[in-house]
Image (tube, rainbow, N blue to C red):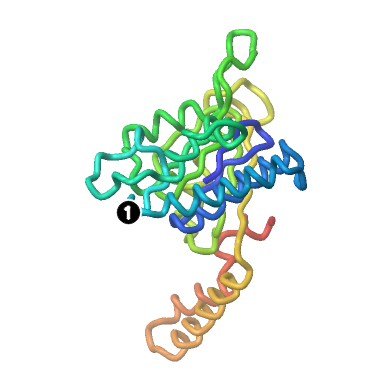
Amino acid sequence: MGFGWQRQRVPRNFGDESSLRSSLKQFFENEIESRLGKDSPDAQQALQRLKQISDQSEIGNAGRIGSRDISVNNEGTRGESFMDLVRKEGGVIGHIATRIEVLDGFTDSSKMEEIAARTAGEKDSAGKLTKSPLAVFAIERAGRALNFKGEVNLVVVGAEKFDRGDLMQILGRTGRTGGTSGPNGDRYDTERNVLVNIKNLSQNGDVVTRMGDYAATQKGSEDLSNKLSQNRGGHKRCPLILEI
């Protein structure tokens, strides 16, 4: 899940650690190029260092990506994760890292709500920002029970993996109650973006079609057959995806 440090920045919710890891690295790359200039020597040096960190972070930590200070104490994760390493860096990499949190399979549940509560940053009584917002990258487990208060945007990556119920749960993590009265009542403003892999989505549709064809030949399966026929194409289970 991506919850960005400004409203135009976005949170991201991933189904697994591999997509989270690659998109987190891409986020750092984009920020480095944006801040230092895509073709500048400083940017190229920082990108090379980022690659070294990424390679090193995959050793000896059982796949942990998030910081050790928010992770459960696990003997197999003693190696340094990607976030452990980038937070030790100086310069642009270290600065970017101070404003990012990663919620992965090793994150302590008690820490997740704390991070959700401060994702949007903090403001004083005059509405002035006193603590910078965070960009939060999270796997699917952050898509339930967490309350991302404040003006937080959401991007769901690989949404074709989720059924309607799970996706609606994930989308409900932002736009929470507690905001000022406005177009959304007392709900905070939010933008929610759902990204799908078209190839995978097409494969989902093929599966649904085959299931429907089979159900149509089975006595007593008329109701199932009708429901599958209504949902052919896979993505029709969640009309939100059609808005992409």
Task: Work out which quarter of the rendered image holds the C terminus and state it.
Answer: bottom right
Image coords of residue 223 (percent x, y)? 44, 76
Q: Is residue 127 left or right of residue 226?
A: right
* Mark 1 neighbour class, 10 Å CA radius: few under 14, some 14 to 19, many 20 or more: some
Compared to residue 216, the image places residue 166 above or below, namely above
Viewer-closest of 217 and 15: 15
Q: Please, which residue is most extreme toward the left here?
A: 75
Compared to residue 109, the image places residue 114 above or below, namely above
Q: Residue at x 60, y 65 (%)?
A: 197
Image coords of residue 71 (percent x, y)? 33, 39
Q: Secondary structure at mark 1?
A: loop
Compared to residue 58, the image places residue 2 above or below, namely above
Q: Residue at x 73, y 43 (%)?
A: 41
Q: Which residue is mark 1?
A: 62
Amino acid type of the residue tagged 1 in the rendering: Ala
Q: Residue at x 49, y 26 (%)?
A: 118
Viewer-closest of 80 and 181: 80
Q: Is residue 150 left or right of residue 242?
A: left
